[in-house]
Amino acid sequence: MKSSPHRHTAAVINLENIAENINRVRGHLPGQPELWAVVKANAYGHGAVRVARHIHDMVEGFCVSNLDEALELRQHLITQPLLVLSGIVPANVDLARANGISLTCPSLEWLELIIEEHQDLTGLKVHVKVDSGMGRIGMRSADEVNQVIRLLDQEGMQFEGLFTHFATADEANPDKFEQQRQTFDNLVSQLERRPRYIHSTNSAAALWHSEQVGDIERLGIGMYGLNPSGEAIELPYELKPALSLVSELTHVSKIPKGETVGYGATYELAEDSYVGTVSIGYADGWTRDMQGFYVLVNGKKAEIIGRVSMDQMTIKLDKDYKIGTPVTLIGRDGDEEITAQDIANWRKTIAYEVVCLLSDRIYRKYIG
Ligand SMILES: *Cc1c(COP(=O)(O)O)cnc(C)c1O
């Protein structure tokens, strides 16, 4: 979708907050792990290229979810190590090799496929994925992992890393985390050969299980200043949200009592009201279930009334306002604040989804 910089609506990304969050997390990690910033999904909606450029010298590498995300960073002259966290289409492995991009090997089967499809894989950098209990991708037996390692060596590939991923590092109950940790440690103890990097931790693990951080911390949501657990566990130290979402009133109408607002006529005005229009809708990732929630205008809550349309929505104002009056959808206005978590709670989802869903149409404006 086309980014729309000439519109009233923008996501404002505070790059300094991201940098501070990285420093803060690093300061709390024991040992000297490398920090690889997770900038998949356009840096969780924050803009992968701009974020990566800003923190380039603060981290040792970047993680992305697919080859195209990695290539985008390379095209923008990001020279750090890049790791693709998901399995990629076997036929495209050459592209990774040519661009010095590290790949995840999720199974022996995948490795055999890429060997079948490519004459020469010399130097391809590979991180071997262990499924210690997430049940998504990765190998579950030491035997399979050792076969993979032998095959990597045989084909002249670089066995750069071995890693796993925790399913419940963001939960108060540590049982499943402990189980996964033991499964992983047990498998690592049976390795025929250790790679340069063994790693397992995401943001939640770094925050609440920092002793588990190995050679690399894969830092995602925490760097954007959001609590991975939602409200389940308090952050052990402050992180600063990096994204706010702002707009302006495009129109204000005085509409009489008894009239309805929006598609489906789902909202009937109980009194003569000032109704404001805001240029954001479900095509921006501002989903229809936001009806009934609120935004901030002039430091006060203004309810979202009527259906959220594709490109616009309507809010109930306490008085008449001029076109161009600021509207805050995520962020602070005076004494009031709306966080991505507040929106996640309203939608019964997680803050990750709220920021990731903000579509490309929303212009990203950078400060710091
Ligand atoms: C997304 C992801 C991360 C980062 O997770 P956060 O919770 O955002 O820190 C780390 N590792 C893997 C394998 C991932 O897919």
Image (tube, grey):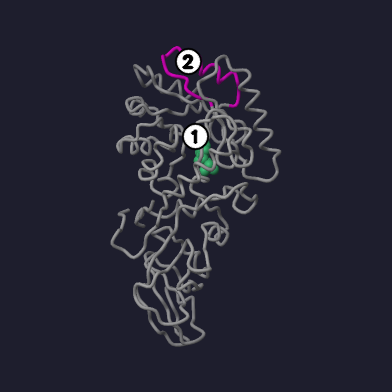
**In front here: 32 or 274?**
32
Q: Is mark 2 within 8 Å of ligand 1?
A: no
- Using a 10 Å C-alpha cutoff, classify the residue at mark 2 as few (fewer than 14 neighbours), some (14 to 19) or many (20 or more): some
For marks 2 and 1, give the CA distance: 28 Å
Q: Quadrant of residue 165?
A: top right
Name the residue type under label 1. Leu
- Type of amino acid under label 2: Leu
Q: Kindly identify which numbered label has been placed on residue 197.
A: none
At a point 44% along the width and 58% down the height, the residue shown is: 244
Residue 214: quarter of image: top right
Helix, strand or loop at mark 1: strand
Q: Quadrant of residue 209?
A: top right
Q: Which residue is mark 2?
A: 151
Give the magenta range: 140-162
Residue 10: percent from the left, percent from the top?
A: 37, 60
Residue 229 lies left or right of residue 172; in this view the side is left
Eyeballing the image, is 1 above or below 149?
A: below
Which residue corresponds to the image point at 34% horizontal and 17% vertical from the top-left?
119
Would residue 366 be found to the left or right of residue 145 on screen?
left
Counting from the top left corner in percent of width and height, residue 93 is at: 37, 27
User: How many numbered circles are shown?
Assistant: 2
- Of the numbered discs 2 and 1, the one sitting upstream in the chain is 1
Give yes or no for residue 253 being in the magenta stretch. Answer: no
| Residue shown at the point (37%, 19%) measured from the top left | 121
Placement of 348 over or under 254, stated as above or below: above
Q: Which mark is residue 35?
A: 1
- Which of these two is toward me, 53 or 141? 53
Q: Secondary structure at mark 2?
A: helix
